[in-house]
Image (cartoon, rainbow, N blue to C red):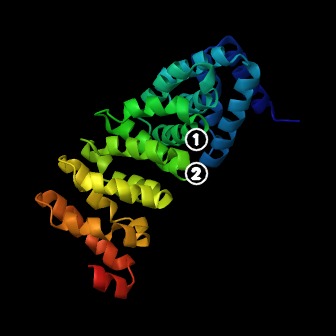
Amino acid sequence: MMPLAEQDWKRDAADAASRGSASALTAALGPVLGTLPDKQARAVKHQALQVIEAALPDPKRLIRLASGLAQSGDETAQELAVFLLSGHYTAAPDETAERLRMLAGSPHAIVRRWTGEACGTLLVKQFHAFYPQLAAWSASPLPHEIAAVTHAVRIAAKTRNPAWSRPLLDLTEQLMLDAPISAGKAKSPLTLGEGVLASYPEETAARLDVWIASANEAVRIHAANMYASAAAAEHWDLLAPGFAKLEQDVSPAVRRAAARARKQLLKRLPPEQSGEAL
């Protein structure tokens, strides 16, 4: 038989969920979570999601509850909201996407991380429905929204779905335009390199010609930064001609990015290949 304390919080959480009360649900979970170490707390949160979904089987009411949790400032409430929203996206796509967009800027780092991963999972499961939402976010001036999109692109690219190569490259290209500095530093090697380049090398190499010729300096800088990734060394035969152009770019900022990438390439390319190419 389960301990009395566990009976109590599950009963109270189920009652709060059935009433659609975000505040009561947070109050029911707070005391038990506050006494547990991280690993056990994660297990309780997982159980709480099961309790909530069992107590509130109506998807639209569940989305309303999740929206209330998302709007609270409580870390646990927002964590639960991420999973409830992404798990029941089809019940209210527009509202769900808007709440996830808000959670991407949560003050809690763990919530931002889960939101990025949830966006990636959603893009894989609901590509055609969720892609336009992410395309709108990609033009945002807010770093956390950009970060959520980059995370989603990386996750979707890992599927290597050939039908997604062009739209993912289009989305990546939008991310390269005027991205906030705080979001852009990791974007090029991770999203460009370990994301789209690793999964779609030939398609990315073809698009690279467009990026290198872009009048937008930010696009060319991100293109140069991509060469710092491990995937760039792996596909060096496709990318070498473009790198030579970036090293001779008219912009000092682009040339500096290429110089930094060169250092990484020298570490990763075989000596005979790096000697000839660089």
Where residue 196 sits in the image (x, y, percent)?
45, 54
Q: Residue at 60% of width from left, 26% of height from top?
A: 89
Q: Is residue 226 left or right of residue 91?
A: left
Q: Nearer the viewer, residue 72 or 130?
A: 130
Element type at mark 1? helix
The residue that label 2 is drawn on is 159
Where residue 190 sits in the image (x, y, percent)?
41, 56
Q: Nearer the viewer, residue 259 or 104?
A: 259
In the figure, 267 relative to 88: above or below?
A: below
The residue that label 1 is drawn on is 124
In the figure, 22 relative to 245: above or below?
A: above
Tell me the crowding category of disc 2: few under 14, some 14 to 19, or many 20 or more residues within 10 angstroms, Cα based.
few
Q: Is residue 261 visible?
A: no
Labelled pair 1, 2 in contact (Cβ < 8 Å): yes
In the figure, 13 relative to 2: above or below?
A: above
Q: Residue at 45% of width from left, 61% of height from top?
A: 201
Where residue 235 sits in the image (x, y, percent)?
42, 69
Tell me the crowding category of disc 1: few under 14, some 14 to 19, or many 20 or more residues within 10 angstroms, Cα based.
many
Label 1, label 2: how many angstroms apart (C-alpha)?
8 Å
Instruction: Identify the disc placed on residue 181.
Output: none
Residue 150, picture quadrant: top left
Q: Is residue 244 left or right of residue 240?
A: left
Q: Residue at 36% of width from left, 39% of height from top?
A: 146
